[in-house]
């Protein structure tokens, strides 16, 4: 059964599949990558925020697991076009809670076709202001330190104005691992 195999692979590799997503926000002329929108100051899942075309709210999203074959570039991928609609010159945020029983060093391994930023508990860990250069498993890796208990992971993903077919994806994938790449799963799930 491909669904069972895929779910086990997602868990094995530590892909985060449960997210709250909000957007779109403005990224006209790729300036939104540097704009500090409200989620960067404080992640408040109950907030109603001013988006690019009007008010936006956080919504729950579960990454797609039901794929025909195990493809590590597809497992746990969060497709923002599917969630927020296919738009250009926009940015969006995804956040999740990651619970761990003690303080611990981890690696965040992530990928995106788009410009992307990553925070852990309000601390910026990585930023890549690069659009449509391809995407593959563990494209980026950065170390971080989980605190005991609940940790907030925040991702900002920006889409630019390019309209070519190869520039359509607006998505990301993220996993939490030990130093050898072994997946770690939040203890709250």
Image: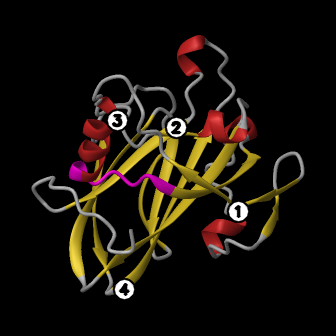
Horizontal placement of 143 versus 172: left or right? left
Asked if the magenta segment contains residue 144, the reply would be: no
**Considering only order in the chain, which callout, 1 or 3, is on the residue closer to the N terminus?**
3
In the picture, the quarter occupied by the C terminus is: bottom left
Mark-to-mark CA distance, 4 and 1: 26 Å
In the picture, the quarter occupied by the N terminus is: top left
Residue 3: mark in rendering: 3
Which secondary structure lies at badge 4? strand
Q: Which residue is mark 1?
A: 37
Horizontal placement of 79 versus 189: left or right? right
Residue 171: mark in rendering: 2
Residue 149: mark in rendering: 4
Count neighbours of disc 3 (C-alpha within 10 A) and say few if under 14, some if 14 to 19, many if 20 or more. some
Task: Please name whichever residue, 21 or 167, is drawn nearer the observer in this view of the structure.
Answer: 21
Magenta region, residue range: 12-18
Which secondary structure lies at badge 1? loop
């Amino acid at each position: 059964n491909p669904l069972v195999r895929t779910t086990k692979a997602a868990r094995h590799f530590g892909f985060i599949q449960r997210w709250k997503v909000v957007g779109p926000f403005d990224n006209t002329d790729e300036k939104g990558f540097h704009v500090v929108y409200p989620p960067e100051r404080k992640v408040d899942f109950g907030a109603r925020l001013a988006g690019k075309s009007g008010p936006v709210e956080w919504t729950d999203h579960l990454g797609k697991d039901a794929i025909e074959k195990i493809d590590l570039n597809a497992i746990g991928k969060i497709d923002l076009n599917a969630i927020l609609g296919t738009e250009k010159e926009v940015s969006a945020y995804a956040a999740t809670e990651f619970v761990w029983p003690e303080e611990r060093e981890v690696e965040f391994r992530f990928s995106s076709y788009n410009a992307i930023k990553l925070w852990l508990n309000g601390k910026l860990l990585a930023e890549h202001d690069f659009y449509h250069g391809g995407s593959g498993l563990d494209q980026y890796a950065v170390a971080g330190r989980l605190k005991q208990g609940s940790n907030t992971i925040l991702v900002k993903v920006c889409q630019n104005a390019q309209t070519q077919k190869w520039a359509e994806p607006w998505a990301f994938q993220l996993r939490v691992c030990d130093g050898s790449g072994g997946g770690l799963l939040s203890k709250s799930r």
